[in-house]
Structure formats: structure tokens, C-alpha cells
Amino acid sequence: MEDYGGSDDEYYYSDDRESLDGLDNEESDFHWVPSKGPSTKIITKESLLAAQREDLRRVMEMLSLREHHARTLLIHYRWDVERLFAAFVEKGKSYLFTEAGVTVVEQLDVDSPLTSSSTVTCDICIEDVSGNKATRMDCGHCFCNDCWTEHFIVKINGGQSRRIRCMAHKCNAICDEAVVRNLVSKKHPDLAEKFDRFLLESYIEDNKMVKWCPSIPHCGNAIRIEEDECCEVECSCGLQFCFSCFSEAHSPCSCLMWELWSKKCQDESETVNWITVHTKPCPKCHKPVEKNGGCNLVSCICGQSFCWLCGGSTGRDHTWSRISGHSCGRYKEDQEKKTERAKRDLYRYMHYHNRYKAHTDSFKLESKLKETILEKVSISEERESRLRDFSWVNNGLYRLFRSRRVLSYSYPFAFYMFGEELFKDEMTTEEREIKQNLFEDQQQQLESNVEKLSKFLEEPFEQYTDEKVMEIRMQVINLSTITDNLCKKMYECIESDLLGALQLGTHNIAPYKSKGIEKASELSSCWSNKVNTADKCLPSDGNTSGGASQHDKPSGSRSSADSGCSSWKRARRDGGGFLDLNLPAEIMDRN
Amino acid sequence: MQASRARLFKEYKEVQREKAVDPDIQLVCDDSNIFKWTALIKGPTETPYEGGVFQLAFSVPEQYPLQPPQVRFLTKIFHPNVHFKTGEICLDILKNAWSPAWTLQSVCRAIIALMAHPEPDSPLNCDSGNLLRSGDIEVINPWQECILDLQRHQRKGEYVQ
């Protein structure tokens, strides 16, 4: 889908605006303008080396360094090449090297080459060894090979192989990885492999712009982002997740809000609240007792009787006026307040949770609806009808998924935004009320339009006349545009009016994208600098229906088969496919 | 294992040779186990520990010198960086700043230096750390004096000062 569109606004409905008469637009010329490649890249096991080499090459060229020195610098600066260059410009080469533990030997000391005839005293094992059995590091410290090897083995097994320092006291220098590899492989080839793997994976482990895909079972991919750390991405395995916190994609909730909400939904905090509101503890066994009717003398299963009003233990006998061994009537304000508050909090939580759950359930049901709708489309296309272009259904369905998702996550957001858990001291009661009304108005508008869109898409349009279908088509197109705009507005409201005025640092949210969560493209292992155009979805002959976009599958779902192109414009039936001259020859041949 | 034994044996020889050179440190190896050592160190001058003799227990790992020895005070000491009950020492060279170039002898020197220059900001003994931070060094003196008095009574002249 991405490959056909222009700007956000034109993205979905360009073909519909051009052919509102509903006639098949087969003869119109189609100009495929490739969009800017996705800013998120998938790094597979194969392309990991290429990705790392790219950054290493830049640093090696810029600072005229050997590979292991460049890697040491990059690990120290967490593979942030720009930050490394900035430090180089601001503070100079020597600061850069000292800070990262890089010792660049400008000129080897001619007086002290290690030969087999010379002997060296190793300060570690306190042995005299011949020169060919000792190694001098860049920093100038020299120890015997056995001691170096043991040192490296301990560090690799301890998971510190990315930055193995020299053994000398207070020497900050990082050991040459070639020396490490060479010495370790003689004794433990498997450990040398482990060392290489750690160095390679450092590109992911130490890099804040690259993270492993959190899929279970793990797909083996990592995702690299180019710009903002606060974003949502989709891996090629189909998992959509928040890049900041690794949980399912959850905007417009901030990561902190989502973490609290997930915990609240999973643990028994609300069960505890219910127990507080509806039960009283037995004064003898302290088990919660619910009063299911009758008077205020309550009996626990342990046999203890107590007064429901104050919770005090009593005798078993009672008259109209009093319970034996007890008289209460004193007003305990604290207890009353506590119960009232718990009751209010519980109802508030239930309000938001019910709506969140309702939209999440609708989202799941609508995901199943996709197959039904596509079936309707194929039936409609087979009919003898003037209408051939049903891309509006795909677009509408996609917009429904996207908006439904935004809507469902807007409830946990509202729960925390206007509750007292996070922003108690940030707003006055009046401010909170004004902001809540503003937000809820937008939420309501979005909700009603999403429901309308859902209703129109569920219509059995395959049975309708062309006129009726045209009517539905116009409604779906309009509602799709409206819901998209409402989603944008809601995000703007959250970013500027709600969170903007508060702790923006703590509560960042992934920006709204009409196109949906960006699907990461594979980082090519051969042409690492170019966008891998081989993955582009080229329209095939006679592809009339196509699948709805997968961008908004429920989080955690996997997609395998339904990756066909959507029917933006159908390819001409005369076999004239579209060629991209930038594609490598073998792919051209395949097409 | 073999390498660590060889290294410890060399250190043992070195200790025998240096006995006269450094009278503040007496390192003794366990007769039956070369991985267990005991040290007696003198309290540094111009500190609350002056005049005291402190016993340290060394437990050397099999991967020594690549990994640091475990050291603790057997003698009670009131010091910000020493746990009052267990005698555990908070010293960087015994943790993350360890280098295989260190020896047991040099570790003892580092501990003496720590006694003379405590680090109240990373205390294992919070009371002592707080006193030192607030500048109440005079309060530490009587504390340590009490401990040293007890120690002298218990020792009955076993160790030459």
C-alpha cells in the first residue's frame, strides 16, 4: 500500500476522487511514484553484519582508524555515529579516545619488539617467558599469552566481551579484538565464536535506535528506527509494538499510562476494591463477609457474630432495639470516607474499563469481519455491474481498524489523564473539568463516526443495486475521511492541550499516522545503503480485489499469507505490468 | 587452578622475602590450604585506628588472579566502609576495579589506605559514615578506643605491636 500514495491526505482516497462515477478506470494511465522508503528497517541475522559495517566504515573513514578502534568508540557512544562525531568536533580526538579507552599507537617502539630471543617477566603469573609467548597491547602493557587468554576467557564468560580492558592496574585501554580472537580460538574455538557473536550483537544490545522484536517465539529480527525513539513499529513477523517499552502498540496512551493500566487490568486491585466496598472483615477470623440480606447482625462461617454497621463483635441474640453485648451508633467518618472513595474509584474504573473492553472486543470482531467483507467484494466484482472498483471497501475497513484502535486506547488515557493517580497536583479541579469535557467531546464524535462506518461496512452491499452501492460508497469514503481527521484532532489535543502543559518528558506518545503503524522494511545485506526495493509490492495482472491493509491487526497477531497488493488501480489486462527500473535485474526477470 | 596455585606460591615466597621491608603487614598462609590466608595489619598513624592490630581473612578464588580475593575483617572495626557485624569491606579494587596485577600484599596496603582515608559516601556502616560526613571524627575515636581496649584484653600480648 505504501508504495502508491502521496501525502497523508491523498493517501487513501486518490483513486476514489478520480473515479466518483464508479466506472472502471481501466484505461487511465497509471504513474507509479515510489514513496520515500520506510524509516524503520528490519535487521535480520544476515543483514546485521552489513548494518554494523556501515557505521564502522563511516567512523573508520572519518577518523582514520582500524576496525576494532572504531568499534570500541561506537560501543562507548552506543552506536550513535552523530553523537560520536559531535564529541569529536567539540572535544577533539584525544578526549574521544581517552574517554572510550582507545589507545592508538602512532608509531611502534622500535626498541621493544617481542622476539623469541628476548625474555619478558609477566606481572600476572610472575614468570619469565620468551618474547614470542607474550603479547603487548596498544597501551604498551605486556603479559604472557596464557595470562591474556585466561583473562579473556573470564571476561567472555562473564558477558563483558564487548569491552575487555587491559589487565594492568588502572589501565583503561580496550584490548584489540583480533588479539582476543586469536588467543582464545587456540584454546576454546567455541568461546571465540561466542566473542564474535557478542561483538556483532552489540550493535543491537548497545544501540538505543535498534531493539529486538519482542515476539514470542522470537522471530530473530531486530528493528532499527531512524528518527524518534517514541514510535510504534511493525516487524515483518506481523507484531506491532511500542519501540520505547516493548509492549503492544498503545498510543494515545503514554508508556507509563499503559504500564499502569495493564497492571491494573491484570492484578486484583479492583477485586480488592470490590471487597472493600461490599464486605466487612470478621473481627475473629478476619475473612471478608458479604451481607446478602437481613438485619445488621451478621454471622461469619467461623461462628462469630458482629455488627454490620461498625464491624464490632457481638453476642448472638438481638432485639428490635439492640444487639446483645453491643451498642453502636457512633459515626466513624474516616471509615465512611474510605468506603465511599473506594466505591467511587471502583465505579470510575469500571466505566473506563467497560468502554475500553467494548472497543477492544469490537476490534477483534471486525478483524474477523475482514474475510466476510472481502468475500462480499469478490461476489460484487463477479456481478455484471458498472461498478468494478471496490478499493473504497479496503480503505474504509482499514480506517475502521485504525480508528477503533485509537478509540479503545483513548479510554485508559482518559482514566489516568483525568484521574488523581498521575496528575493530581498538575491541574485545578476546574481545569481538569474543562479539559475532560473537551477531550470527551472529541472522543464521542470519533466514537459515533466509527460506529457509523462499522455499520455501513457491514451492509450486505453485494445484494444491493448499483445506486445503493454508490450511496454506501460515498458514505464510507466520507466517514473514512472524517474519522481520520477526528483521530488527528484527538492526537493534537492530547499533545498540545493535555500532555503539552504537563510532564511532557514522562508522557510522550507515538505520533498519529494516517497510514497506520509503519511496517519496517528489510535492511538489505548486499546494498545496505539503499532501500530494499525488492520488497515493494508490484500490482500483478488482474488483481482486482486485493486484501485490506494489515497495518492494524490486533497486536501480537501474525500475518503470513494475506500480503497481496491492495487494489488501488488494477493493472491493465493487456499484460502491461509496471516496471521499476531501479530494481536489480534478477527481480526484473522474475516479474 | 594450577595457574592460581603457582601464582599464590610465588606470592608466598615474595611475602617471606618482604617480611622485614613492610612491618605493618604480616601475611600468613594456611598450612593445609593455599587458598586461605590471614593478614595482620597495623592501624595507620594519626587515625582512630592507630595502635590497633587488625586481623583480615582472605579467601582466594580458583580463578585468582583473574578474579579478586574475598577479604573481610575478623577484628571488630568501626569504619564507614566496613560492615560492623560481618567485617565485609567496600573497596572498589575488591569488586569491579580489580586488576590481575594486584597481589595479596598490595590488597593489604590498599586496605590500610582505606582505613586512613575512608569513603563516607558509600558506607557499609551507616552510623560511622554519618558521623564522618557530619565531621564528628572525635566521636569515632572513643568508639574505636573501646573496641581496641577490648581487643587488647582479649589478645593478652599475642601479637607484637
Image: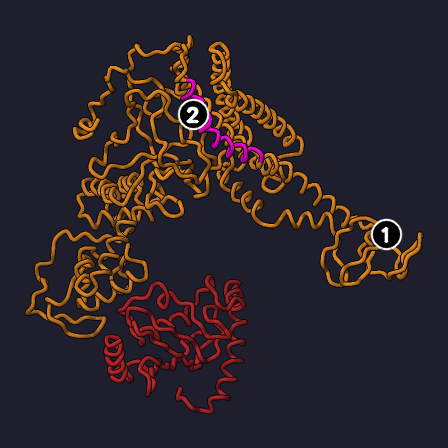
Instruction: Please determine whether, in this image, residue B158 is positioned above or below residue A211.
Output: below
Residue at the (36%, 47%) spot, across then down: A218
Q: Which colour scheme is used?
A: by chain
In the image, A251 versus A29, the foreground residue is A29
Per the image, is A371 magenta?
A: yes
Residue A189 left/right relative to B41: left
Q: Which of marks 1 and 2 is in front?
A: 2
Colour in which the image shows chain B: red
Residue B94 percent across, percent down from the top left? 36, 68
How far, Cα to Cα, is label 1 from label 2? 68 Å
Q: In which quarter of the image is residue A235?
A: top left
Q: Which amino acid does label 1 sit on?
A: Arg
Q: In this view, does B121 lie to the left or right of A52?
A: right
Chain for disc number 1:
A
Q: Residue A330 — which label?
A: 1
Instruction: Give the extent of the magenta segment.
Output: A358-380
Badge 2 is on which residue? A374
